[in-house]
Each structure stands twice: as C-alpha cells, then as structure tokens.
Image (cartoon, coloured by chain):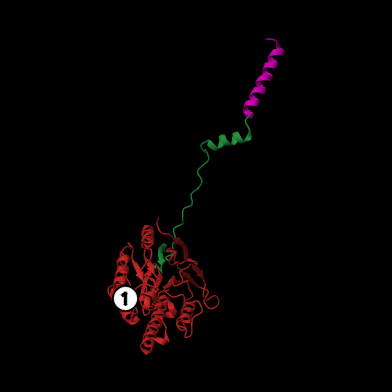
Chain colours: A green, B red
Amino acid sequence: MPLRNVVLLAWLCIALTACTQAGIDSRSPVDRQATQDNQPSTDKPAPVAVPAQSSDASAVPGFEFVVLGDTA
Amino acid sequence: MPDDYPAYYALIDAINALRPVFSIHVGDTKGGGTDCGDAAQQRIREDFRRFKQPLVYTPGDNEWTDCWTRHAGGYDPQERLAAVRELFFTGDGNQGGGQLALQRQEDMPENALWWRAGVLFASAHIVGSNNGLRPEAGEVHLAAFADREAADVAWLQHAFAQANQRQAAAVVLAFHANMFVPSPVPDGFARLRPLIGELAADFGGPVLLLQGDYHFYILDRPYPQSAPNVQRLQTYGAPMLNAVRISVQPGAAQPFRFAPVLPLS
C-alpha cells in the first residue's frame, strides 16, 4: 500500500475513533432526556433520614379524638 | 332526637372508621322543638351505643333546661335533669364502646375528667340558653342554677389544679354553651366566662375549649389579651351533621390540628 494511502487510512481511523468517543447523538435534546429518564439509575441511593434516638422523655406519641354536638 | 337519623348514623360510621381514641358529644342530642320524655332520651342512649370507641357526653340545654316549653312537653327542667342523670350518668359514664377511666364530680356526675398522654380532658355542665338562667322561673330554679354554677366553679378549679400539679402538656375543656356572644341580663356566664380565662392564663400552656350550641364551625382565641394560649372550637351542628377530628401532639407548641369529619355516604 502506498504510504499516502496508509496515512489516509490512519487519519480516517483517528477521526472515526474520535467521533465514537465523543458520542455524537443526532437525537433531539428531549429524546435524549426521555431515554435517560427511563434508565435505571446507577447513582448511589439517596441517604434515608433516620430519626435520631431521642433521649427526651417528654416525646409522647400523638393521638386523635373527635368532637361532635348539636346532632338534632 | 336527630331529625335526620340516616345522616347521624352515617356520621357515627365515619367516626368509627377513623378509630379515634374517644369522642366527645358536647350536647343537644335532641332538637329544642321535640318532646323531652323518657322515650326520646332512651333512643339517644341507644344511639350512643353505635359508637365503637369510648364516648364522653356532656348535656346541652335541649335535654333538660328548655324542656319547660310547650312544644318540648312542658316538663319541669329539674325533673328532666334528674332523668338525664339517671339514664346517662349513674354508671361509669362511658356511653360508647370501650372504657375510659373517668373521674367524676360527686355532686354533678356529668362533669368528668380524664387524661391521655399527658393532656388533661374535662367536661363541664355549662349549657346554652344563657346557661339555663331564667329569673322568671322562680326561687327554686334560681337556687338550682346557683348550685350548678358553684359545682362548675369547683370543678374547673379542680381540673386546672390537677393540670398545674401534674404539669399537663395541655388542657381540653368541653361544654355545650357558646358563652362568647353577648348574653342577656342577668348573664348566665358572668362567673364562669372570666374564671375559665383566669385559670387558663394561670396554667399558661395550650388550652382548647370545645363547645357547640350555635351549629356552625368557629376556631378562634376568645381571650386574645388576657389568655392568648386559649383556643376555642365550636363544632358543627344540625343540619350540617359533621364532626371535627382533632389530632393532638403533646408537648408541641401548637399541639392541636383540626379536620372535618363528614358522614359516610
């Protein structure tokens, strides 16, 4: 293969690799976001707030009652 | 006696579905224009048994005070009060299902006191129609009024003394009368209205007054200057057969939250 063709092929390979790595995406921004939204998250789960153990003896569970009147 | 039994029963069904720790009926279980006889009271007693959780009841004016009128049967109010006490308050005072440990006033057993999660609850026999004060009814009537008023004064003082002694998280006081409207002369609430404000101000913690009488919803602070820690709830009444669900968070600065209860359709 002539040296000129080798150089041309090499340049084409470099250009193709660069395009692939750049992830050129012809989809619209909306379509891309929709795809991302449907993907399972690979993020770490958000930390869950755990109530601190209270040492306050006055922390009393709530309750509900009902008042009614003048039922006639 | 409820004019609209299906709606009343549907309201009780809605209350039962909520499974409250208890309910309080603040009086006027019958209309002022219906007969005050034993049959009506017996029917009311039977209807109370529909409540699956405990029910505490404090009488209203329609049950006895106003029974002297012709359309209510022309009864002697004191005789009707004795009948109400005999039917509703000779036992432990619990009306619905379940049991509450109720402390009762010896002279006036319809006045009750109980605790829940550090909150003191008390009922007081204070009724609409000017608290039943009718000077034209004569000396016997006036003497009975004075006795009941003195018993209420003692009971309110006792309740707030308990609340202070045990450092209650809040106080809930239930009675029938809307005493926060202009009253005739003589004023049947002249002694009790300021007393409640004074006792509540001295207590200092959250105080909730529950009452009926005027049949529409009010939530306000009736002592804005002298006792701003007092809230007053006037519950719904017929023909708007709703109730009010009260969520209590003891120890919170604002421990009471309110939501209507509508009859199950």
Residue located 67% across and 23% down the image: A15
Q: Nearer the viewer, residue B168 or B131?
A: B131
Q: Is residue B60 visible?
A: no
Image quadrant holding the C terminus of chain A, namely bottom left
Residue located 47% across and 63% down the image: B258
Percent across and percent down for residue B255 are 47, 66
Position of A6 compared to A49: left or right?
right
Q: For mark 1, give the secondary structure.
A: helix
User: For the residue marked with disc 1, what is the amino acid?
Assistant: Val
Q: Is residue A42 above or below residue B174?
A: above
Position of B81 compared to A18: left or right?
left
A21 within the magenta span = yes
Percent across and percent down for residue B30 are 37, 70
Position of B112 compared to B221: left or right?
left
Crowd around label 1: few <14 · some 14–19 · many ≥20 (10 Å): many
Residue located 47% across and 83% down the image: B187
Question: How many numbered marks appear?
Answer: 1
Q: Which residues are magenta?
A: A1-25
Q: Nearer the viewer, residue B242 or B150?
A: B242
In the rendered image, which quarter is residue A60 located in?
bottom left
Per the picture, the main secondary structure of the magenta-coloured stretch is helix
In the rendered image, which quarter is residue B122 located in?
bottom left
* Residue beneath disc 1: B84
Residue most toward the front? B70
B237 within the magenta span = no
Image quadrant holding the N terminus of chain A, namely top right
Q: Is residue B21 above or below residue B203?
A: above
